[in-house]
């Protein structure tokens, strides 16, 4: 069978790429399906697959390529891992095999049997072709509809609101008590004041860029009470204080700072929400966050080798090996960073009062939404704060160890 005939037959169904970006990606998907690398699909079945593709694209739009097809791809991956395929509800089953989809059934038939079980003879080339078709647009970055952005922001607010209603039962209190003792052991020799502040690579809520970041103009009392400006915002830890007296007294005096919510492109499912911190907060957060990460990764014998910030190759190799052995599994926690409450951090770090004071002094207590609304944060620190991941990583490890010992 000529590989080009099915494509030629569908030229009239695909609009010229210059007229629509969406149809351009549809055309790519048509080309991928029609190439039929194993040559196992009949002309009739291939035509039916293309009809289904174009029909569903016409009714669902680009989301069929970016969201619906990846759901079938994930079902394929799960079927390979569990040795049995389960058909997603978004797809009709094949008449000849009710366990697999009618769409692309020629290739699914090569991989799964009539009961959905994985075939011993399943060719790797068939899996490769299906994954290429089903996932090719999964990470496509596109402009987001205002409704999608509003949904992300509303979820952010709802998650934060929910933290205030969490009730710790007796079992949870016992786990947290054990976690706090572990924290005391891990950070017994940690000095939160022995830090080297620095600027971060990201944007700041106060708007400074490049060399303007070196012009500190706000004195936040929340920071100043623990990290005095004349020590941590001057060279030589205050040795130039006399020369910079005018600058010091010219700064705006504020009780605390307000972060700013920023939506950044992630993939076709929607934007990622991060928090841009005020300049002076970012300066100290970078110093304390890096100090904590270095301590957890290289100093504490309890956490060394179990928490890796610098070299992700360790985690990648474990994940890659476990995909074959199933010895370990990755855990995807939805909105994990936004679910670490300030109350939880205060409970776990209660036996290290100096470190807890430092953490509280350097977190933004509120954030500004794109709508202009200011939200008082119940979470400890959203993504964007340099303290987010070191604290979250330790809490997860501490929780796991507490549960194993409980």
Image (cartoon, grey):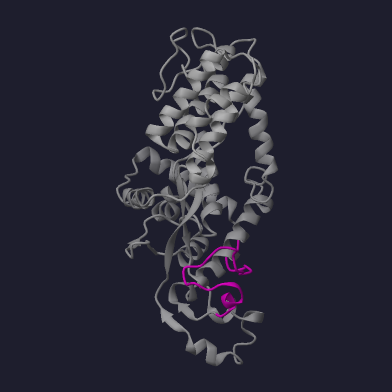
Q: Nearer the viewer, residue 380 or 277?
A: 277
Q: Position of residue 170 (x, y in %)?
A: 35, 40
Residue 69 in the image, given as x and y percentages of width and height: 48, 30
Q: Quadrant of residue 290?
A: bottom right
Q: Residue at x 51, y 28 (%)?
A: 74
Residue at (67%, 45%) from the top-left corner? Answer: 312
The one nearer the camera, 149 or 227, is 149
Quadrant (top left/top right/bottom left/bottom right) for the N terminus: top right
Residue at 65% in and 18% down: 2
Magenta region: which residues?
Answer: 190-215
Question: In the picture provided, is 153 more to the left or to the right than 112?
Answer: left
The answer to which of 401 and 367 lies nearer the viewer is 367
Instruction: Give the vertical position of 65 relative to 51 (above or below).
Output: below
Residue 142 coordinates in the image, percent (x, y): 49, 48
**Going by the image, does 189 lie left or right of 225?**
right
- In which image quadrant can residue 119 be found? top right
Residue displayed at 32% across by 48% down? 162
Residue closer to the observer: 391 or 75: 75
């Amino acid at each position: 069978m000529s590989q080009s005939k099915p494509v030629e037959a569908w030229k009239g169904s695909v609009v010229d790429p210059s007229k629509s970006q969406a149809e351009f990606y549809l055309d790519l998907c048509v080309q991928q399906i029609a190439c039929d690398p194993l040559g196992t699909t009949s002309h009739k079945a291939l035509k039916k697959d293309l009809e289904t593709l174009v029909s569903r694209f016409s009714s669902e739009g680009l989301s069929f390529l970016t969201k619906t097809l990846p759901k079938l791809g994930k079902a394929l991956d799960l079927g390979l891992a569990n040795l049995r395929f389960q058909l997603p509800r978004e797809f009709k089953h094949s008449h000849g095999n009710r366990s697999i989809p009618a769409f692309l059934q020629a290739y699914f038939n090569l991989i799964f049997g009539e009961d959905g079980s994985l075939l011993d003879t399943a060719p790797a080339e068939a899996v490769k072709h299906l994954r290429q078709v089903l996932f090719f647009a999964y990470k496509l970055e596109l402009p987001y509809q205002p409704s999608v952005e509003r949904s992300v922001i509303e979820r952010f607010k709802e998650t934060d609101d929910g933290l205030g209603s969490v009730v710790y039962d007796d079992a949870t209190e016992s786990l947290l008590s054990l976690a706090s003792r572990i924290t005391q052991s891990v950070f017994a020799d940690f000095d939160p004041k022995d830090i080297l502040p620095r600027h971060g690579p990201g944007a700041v809520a106060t708007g400074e860029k490049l060399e303007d970041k070196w012009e500190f103009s706000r004195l936040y009392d929340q920071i100043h009470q623990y990290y005095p400006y004349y020590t941590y915002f001057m060279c030589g830890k205050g040795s130039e204080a006399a020369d910079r007296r005018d600058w010091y007294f010219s700064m705006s005096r504020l009780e605390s700072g307000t972060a700013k919510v920023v939506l950044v492109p992630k993939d076709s499912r929607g934007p990622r929400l991060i928090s841009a911190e005020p300049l002076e907060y970012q300066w100290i957060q970078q110093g304390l966050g890096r100090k904590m990460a270095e301590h957890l990764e290289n100093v504490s014998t309890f956490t060394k080798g179990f928490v890796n910030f610098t070299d992700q190759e360790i985690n990648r190799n474990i994940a890659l090996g476990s995909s074959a052995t199933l010895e370990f599994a990755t855990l995807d926690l939805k909105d994990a960073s936004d679910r670490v409450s300030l109350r939880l951090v205060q409970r776990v770090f209660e036996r290290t009062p100096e470190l807890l004071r430092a953490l509280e002094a350097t977190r933004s207590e509120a954030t500004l939404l794109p709508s202009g609304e200011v939200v008082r944060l119940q979470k400890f620190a959203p993504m964007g704060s340099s303290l987010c991941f070191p604290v979250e990583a330790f809490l997860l490890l501490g929780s796991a160890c507490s549960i194993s010992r409980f």
